[in-house]
Image: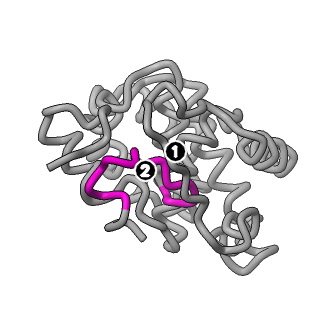
Amino acid sequence: MNRCFWAGDDPLMIDYHDKEWGKPVHDDRIHYEFLVLEGAQAGLSWMTVLKKREGYRRLFAEFDPERVALFSRETIEDILQEPSIIRNRLKIESAVTNAKAFLAVQREFGAFDTYIWQFVDGRPIRNRWKNSSDIPVSTELSEKISKDLKKRGFRFVGPTIVYSYLQAVGIVDDHMDDCDFKEKMQ
């Protein structure tokens, strides 16, 4: 079976690649989850984040933005003591800040999904990459969305993080041309 180069041979990465990455998401809770996880990844490997994903689910109320938006200073301090996640104060605080901004977007657009998919007119961008070196780390689209998210109060949403998020939730399909999952994710 051909997979994207980055899936490697680790079962956790293979499972993520085969079942999630690049599959179009339309569930707001999953959108929030990937915003948190992609922000947590900044400066780290995706494998590190995947290994700690269950800890994030437990500590961040199953990625329920309504509950996370209510986290107190004490809750944040408790989370900072947990080895089951990446204990970076700015990243943890941004998850709470982003939950509040996420809820504001939901109020304005009816769903975060409606907001984020409008940037591509509801249709995924399907790239055709033959070489891994061709895949960008950011694009004009990720820069545009990053600016808009920041304007709305989101943090840890630079163009590179946003591009990774767009790949994860299937707004951008960056499966390699020879990847057997390229067509399965549509």
Q: Is residue 186 above or below residue 49?
A: below
Q: Which residues are magenta?
A: 169-182
Residue 60 image label: 2
Disc 2, SS: loop
* Residue 133 relative to residue 93: left or right: left
Foreground mark, 1 or 2? 1
Q: Which residue is mark 1?
A: 36
Q: Which kind of residue does numbered mark 1 sit on?
A: Val
Residue lying at 74% horizontally and 70% vertically, measured from the top left = 118
**Left or right of residue 6, residue 162 in this image:** right
Q: Height in image: 61 above or below 135?
A: below
- Image quadrant holding the C terminus, namely bottom left
Q: In this view of the protein, which residue sits in the foreground, 149 or 68? A: 149
Q: Which amino acid does the dot numbered 2 rest on?
A: Phe
Q: Is residue 133 magenta?
A: no
> Would you say 108 lies left or right of 50 here?
right
Query: Tag 1, which secondary structure?
Result: helix
Question: Can you tell which quarter of the image residue 161 is in?
Answer: top right
- Residue at 81% x, 74% y: name it: 108
Q: CA distance from mark 1 to mark 2?
A: 9 Å
